[in-house]
């Protein structure tokens, strides 16, 4: 199967090792960090943890230092593999595009929208696909001019449904538009995850992991340390069995120290991986960090 994410944005990964360290991306650690690290501190922290890939999320206060972010990541040998991106070509979007072009960074731009309630009439469904495709098209065209791609990012609501994202991609017919799937925004998909994953896989640019329990988002357990969820092992088995070799995201996304949170998730992954090979579970790691308040 040929995946459509840009090869320059990720390390080459053996097909039997989708969870290899060089294939892991750190995500949601810029505005989600108790220590409020700056670009240099963050790049050093990522290198210390062994990350070679980084997906950059931000708030308006961070954009003035985006140029420094790129410079320090390069210095520390960390690839800027994805960037959180506005849903229109506004001033922030132009700032990001200008910096990426200046530094000759070819990366993924992750875009999310809402779209409203999931349930709708067939006529409304068709209209929404057209409207969202029209909104994505200029972003994708601007991205293509500098060698970037656009990942449709599930964040709940209508736009967060994989089938709707696939419909948007089909209508666009652009080679540089795919899907970024987040487990922490997919609690409602758990029962049909194997089916959905198979549908998404030809378009999948990245998959962000999370500790998962059934209906965790409804019971204060939306964001869990990887390995602490009772669904984690089966989800990893599904991913491993699929043949997927694209990027795997390790998220921060809490108000904790981002380094500790990332390390907790790495520890959880290391605890789960031997179990994928049929080995008995060892003592489960004790996380340093807690839940998202």
Image (cartoon, helix red, strand yellow):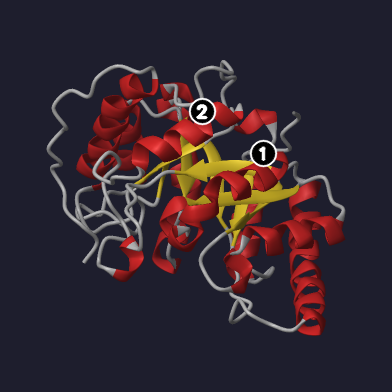
In the rendered image, residue 216, in percent from the top left (x then y), is placed at 32, 61
**Vertical placement of residue 63 versus 7, above or below:** below
**Classed neighbour count for the residue bearing mark 2: other residues with Cα under 10 Å, few (<14), some (14–19), many (≥20):** some
Q: Is residue 285 left or right of residue 54?
A: left
In the rendered image, residue 240, in percent from the top left (x then y), is placed at 51, 28
Under tag 2, what secondary structure? helix
In the rendered image, residue 231, in percent from the top left (x then y), is placed at 35, 45
> Which quadrant is home to the C terminus?
bottom left
Residue 105, by quadrant, is: top right
Q: Marks 2 and 1, how far apart in space?
A: 27 Å
Out of 263 and 83, give the one closest to the viewer: 263
What residue is rendered at 31% in x and 56% in y?
A: 223
Q: Between tags 2 and 1, which lies in front?
A: 2
Q: Which residue is mark 2?
A: 240
**Vertical placement of residue 165 versus 249, above or below:** below
Q: Which residue is mark 1?
A: 106
Out of 290 and 271, give the one closest to the viewer: 271
Residue 214, by quadrant, is: bottom left
Out of 100 and 15, give the one closest to the viewer: 15
Is residue 39 in sight in this rendering?
yes
Q: Is residue 22 left or right of residue 41?
A: right
What residue is rendered at 56% in x and 23% in y?
A: 11
Is residue 102 in sight in this rendering?
no
Can you tell which mark lies on residue 88?
none
**Vertical placement of residue 212 versus 44, above or below:** below
Under tag 1, what secondary structure? loop
Label 2 or label 1, whichever comes before in sequence order: 1
Q: Is residue 134 left or right of residue 41?
A: right
What residue is rendered at 12% in x and 37% in y?
A: 286
**Classed neighbour count for the residue bearing mark 1: other residues with Cα under 10 Å, few (<14), some (14–19), many (≥20):** many
What residue is rendered at 53% in x and 49% in y?
A: 193
In the rendered image, residue 271, in percent from the top left (x then y), is placed at 26, 27
């Amino acid at each position: 199967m040929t995946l459509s994410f840009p090869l320059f944005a990720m390390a080459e990964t053996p097909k039997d090792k989708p969870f290899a360290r060089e294939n892991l991306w750190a995500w949601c650690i810029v505005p989600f960090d108790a220590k409020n690290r700056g670009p240099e501190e963050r790049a050093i922290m990522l290198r210390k943890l062994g990350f070679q890939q980084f997906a950059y999320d931000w708030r308006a206060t961070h954009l003035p230092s985006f140029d420094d972010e790129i410079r320090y990541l390069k210095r520390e040998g960390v690839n800027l593999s994805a960037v959180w991106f506005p849903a229109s070509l506004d001033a922030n979007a132009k700032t990001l595009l200008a910096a990426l072009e200046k530094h000759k960074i070819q990366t993924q731009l992750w875009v999310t929208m809402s779209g409203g309630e999931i349930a709708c009439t067939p006529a409304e469904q068709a209209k929404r696909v057209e409207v969202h495709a029209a909104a994505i098209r200029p972003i994708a065209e601007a991205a293509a001019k500098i060698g970037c791609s656009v990942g449709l990012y599930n964040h709940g609501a209508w736009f967060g449904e994989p089938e709707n994202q696939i419909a948007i991609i089909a209508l666009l017919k652009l080679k540089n538009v795919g899907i970024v799937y987040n487990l922490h925004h997919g609690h409602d998909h758990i029962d049909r995850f194997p089916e959905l994953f198979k549908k998404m896989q030809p378009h999948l640019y990245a998959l962000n992991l999370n500790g998962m329990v059934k209906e965790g988002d409804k019971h204060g357990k939306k964001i869990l340390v990887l390995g602490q969820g009772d669904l984690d092992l089966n989800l990893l088995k599904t991913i491993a069995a699929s043949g997927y070799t694209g990027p795997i995201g390790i998220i921060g996304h809490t108000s904790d120290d981002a380094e500790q949170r990332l390390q907790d998730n790495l520890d959880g992954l290391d605890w789960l991986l031997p179990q994928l090979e049929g080995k008995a579970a060892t003592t489960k790691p004790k996380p340093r960090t807690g839940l998202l308040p």
